[in-house]
Image (cartoon, helix red, strand yellow):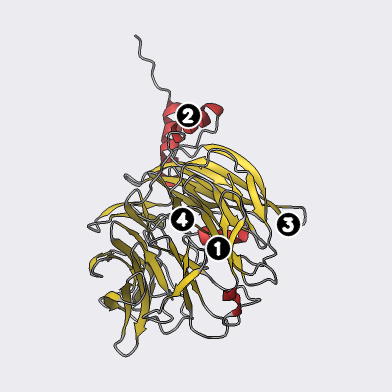
Amino acid sequence: MKNTPIKKHTIHSLAILFLFCVMTVCAQVPDDSPQAREAAMTRLKKVTIYAPCNDASVMTRPFGTTCNSREFAAPPVLSAPKIQWEINPGWWSVWTPFVTEKYVLTGSCNNDTNAGLSIIDKKTGKIVWNISNICQTGNRRGSMGTIQFFELPAEEVLMVYPREDGGPIDYYVISLKTGRITRSLKMIKPLAPIRSYGNVFTAVTQSAKNGYSVLSGLNSDLNQVLWENTAFRLAMPDKLDPHYKPTFSAGASEDGILFLSARSKEQTDPPTRHLHAIDLASGKTLWRHTDQPATERSGTKEYKSDDGIPMITDHKVIIKVQGLDGPTGPGSRPYGEGLRAFDKNTGKILWTAKLPSKQYFINRAGAGTVVVAEVQAGKEKEIHGYSTKDGKLVWRRKIPVNAGLLCSSGGAFYVGERIVDENNQWKDTKLQGFDGETGTLLWTTGLPERLFQYAANTPWNIESPAGGLPVWTIDRDGSIYGVTLKGAYKLK
């Protein structure tokens, strides 16, 4: 066979392409053809039971699992969801839904009828039980309130409900067998914010007298301290400092290890939060991430990257890092953002995936063996898919500026987009499903804005400081349960 010489312009084009890939990060643009979609659907249809995290929870957590990766233990949603039922009991501002094996728990005290906690049958949408007397306690009637639900053993649910009159927080235990409050717990650390990681609750307090913050492990009755870890600094005194962050981040846990970021007493000044791995049985610190890049220099001060909120994807701990391109001056955004993965048992850095300059992460979620990241690229938005094996960028695609990454299940992930009219008023929401492995578009649908409140997209954003809980959740069979300002619904 005669060899055909490569022309000079071809070599030049290849050189330009190589340079472009080096400078802008080459990755496959997802194939949305019918063939690619069918191949992705065929693979995803095999996922009938999905466990993205070693989490023993039976009830559905607001962010999916204890791994805090916005990934639900549910099959993928493979077609546009449709309304199965919707109720409007006259509520105004409804509590985040909590889903058990048979019921959805939600409600409101901000209404005249049907006030209180409603326990709703998941199949029919009918209210099975209602607990109204909680609204008459602590001046709650007519108020929105902030509610938290936690799973307890023996088909019980813990409802944490602060009072509006400055009285003590109530810790109601609700029986799912009788639909009644069976008892109230007496919290051993009053006013301390709590989180649940299986059979262990954690509480955060400060000891100004001793000069440290305390992370405590509590039993499920909240009346016994199992352990205390006092290795943390007090809260920063000046919350007006632009570098201020809460002492502790939200946490993620798997296999009996809690991962959170916090300021350690061992750090030199000025301190930023380091990722800690803490044994949930003993409270001992197993390892700590101390290799933070410098993000800013100001005189003699050098600020380091804050490890932020961790999540666990494909059994690896993932955080965001900044300053990979070196520190900036005061008031400038750090250069060089990336994702960093750790071995959860040893703390060894497995990989760091760096964005091109002048791009930064808005949000991220797990999707099987891929970390899906929402990225700001100049005036545009993109979604990137990073392999959890080595951090390589495997695909990237553009999305509209009004769109946002939400969550995932069964290896598929979901994006919501706020659709506005000619007066820039929000009229409905476009919801789309994508394959996590390839980034291929699976389906698109439009839904009324009342169902997928885009303002409530913020809690899905792991990078957002606003906090709060999502207004909808994905159950273990792939059904979606959510609340509107006036009621509750099921999609399937």
Circle 2 residue? 39
x 36%, y 72%: residue: 221
Q: Gap in Å between the C-alphas at discs 2 and 1?
A: 36 Å
Whole-percent x, y for residue 195 in the image: 40, 68
Give the secondary structure at mark 2: helix
Per the rendering, the mark at residue 321 is: none
Q: Gap in Å between the C-alphas at discs 2 and 4?
A: 30 Å
The one of 303 and 330 positioned closer to us in this rendering? 303
Circle 4 residue? 60
Which mark is first along the chain, 4 or 2? 2
Badge 4 crowding class, 10 Å Cα cut-off, few under 14, some 14 to 19, many 20 or more, is many
Whole-percent x, y for residue 246 in the image: 42, 74
x 49%, y 45%: residue: 477
Circle 3 residue? 424
Q: Amino acid at mark 3?
A: Asn
Give the secondary structure at mark 3: loop
x 58%, y 74%: residue: 145
Q: Give the mark toward the camera: 2 or 3.
A: 2
- Can residue 304 be seen from the camera position used here? yes
